[in-house]
Amino acid sequence: MIKRAIAAVFIMAISLLTVSCKIESPEEHGKNNGGGDLTCTVSIDCKTVLDNMDKLKASKASVIPEDGMICEKTEVSFSDGETAFDVLVRLTREKNIHMEYNKVPAYDSVYIEGIENLYEMDCGELSGWTYLINGEGLNYGCDQCVLEDGDVLEWRYTCDLGRDVGAYKE
């Protein structure tokens, strides 16, 4: 009886997740093709992993660049109203960098699951992708962050819930 109840709760939880989450490819998102008259500087790194190799899943060691840089600072053109997410989608597509995200309607937000085959919890239970704008961590989804001309957008892999990359907000 208890096993059936646990199984039922598990199935309901999976069903709710399936209903509330929508996974899109970058091609499906494609809000704007960029090429606007505004620019920002974007980088993607996983340098914190280099100091936490003992926490990294063994199967992921081969995806970590020696210097931790997935994409060096790159100037990206964008249009008025575009977000940090829009620019990430375009940059990863143009540079052929693998990226996966999850659109969660319940939170009206996008969650970056993985970049270049490095995913949340691959380097400990507090690890995952976060972003900073002009050196400041934000506490809302990247699809809600409208960029301004001259912004510096950093995508950082954190091994400590953002504390190790300056993105933690109390």
Image (tube, helix red, strand yellow):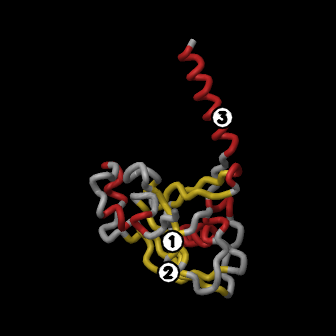
Amino acid identity at mark 1? Lys
Please tell me whether mark 1 sits on a helix, a strand or a loop: loop
Q: Residue tagged by mark 3?
A: 15
Assess whether mark 1 and mark 2 are in contact (beta carbons under 8 angstroms). Answer: yes
Amino acid identity at mark 3? Ser
Q: Select label 3 or label 2 by which is in front.
A: 3
Q: What numbered label is drawn on residue 74?
A: 2
Density class for disc 1 (Cα within 10 Å; few <14, some 14-19, many ≥20) is few
Instruction: Give whichever of discs 2 and 1 has the lower sequence position.
Output: 2
Residue 117 appears in the figure: no
- Which of the 4 image quarters holds residue 31? bottom right
Q: Residue at x 61, y 63 (%)?
A: 140
In the image, is 168 to the left or to the right of 106?
left
Residue 135 appears in the figure: yes
Question: Residue 90: x and y, percent?
Answer: 60, 71
Amino acid identity at mark 2? Thr
Question: Residue 14: x and y, percent?
Answer: 61, 35
Q: What numbered label is drawn on residue 95?
A: 1
Question: Residue 86: x and y, percent?
Answer: 64, 69
Instruction: Give whichever of discs 3 and 2 has the lower sequence position.
Output: 3
In the image as oriented, which residue stretches furthest toward the front? 170
Q: Select label 3 or label 1 by which is in front.
A: 3
